[in-house]
Image: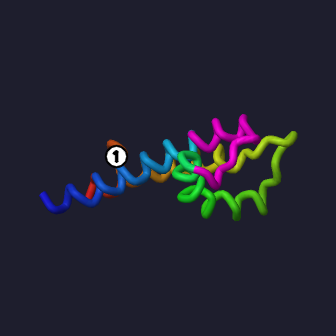
């Protein structure tokens, strides 16, 4: 029972971050939105920490910030590897 809680929590956190990064992708279509104001700040604050280093390595392409797209891929991959049907934490 206790061994099932950690994978569940990790799956929920990774799922939440996937959702937040998807919202960030949508928000890149609306540059006039102030990400420092609510409710947009609830999406921006937890994700910006991850996006800043990626932006330094991968600049915007054609004026489009692709860093949230990169993070959706990373988080989805981690979620599948760790807590997917044949994930490492499920097999333990």
Residue 33 quadrant: top right
In the foreground, 43 or 78: 43
Disc 1 target residue: 86
Q: Nearer the viewer, residue 53 or 40?
A: 40
12 w.r.t. 50: above or below:
above
User: Is 68 drawn above or below residue 30 in the view shown?
Assistant: below
For the N terminus, the quadrant is: bottom left
Q: Is residue 24 above or below residue 58?
A: above
Left or right for 63, reference 18:
right
Residue lying at 52% horizontally and 52% vertically, measured from the top left:
42
Q: Secondary structure at mark 1?
A: loop
- Image coords of residue 64 (percent x, y): 79, 41
Residue at 31% in and 56% down: 9
Viewer-side residue, 58 vs 21:
21
Q: Position of residue 66 (x, y in %)?
A: 72, 45
Is 27 magenta? The answer is yes
Image quadrant occupied by the C terminus: bottom left
Magenta residues, start to end: 23-37
Q: State the image coordinates of residue 54 (x, y, percent, origin top left).
A: 71, 59
Q: How many discs appear?
A: 1
Rendered view: 69 above or below 46: above
Asked whether, in this view, residue 58 is left or right of residue 88, the answer is right
């Amino acid at each position: 029972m206790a061994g099932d809680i950690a994978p569940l929590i990790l799956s929920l956190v990774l799922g939440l971050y996937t959702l937040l990064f998807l919202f960030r992708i949508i928000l890149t279509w609306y540059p006039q939105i102030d990400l420092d104001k609510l409710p947009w700040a609830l999406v921006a604050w937890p994700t910006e920490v991850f996006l800043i280093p990626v932006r330094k390595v991968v600049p915007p392409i054609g004026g489009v910030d692709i860093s949230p797209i990169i993070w959706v891929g990373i988080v989805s991959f981690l979620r599948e590897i760790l807590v997917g049907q044949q994930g490492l934490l499920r097999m333990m």
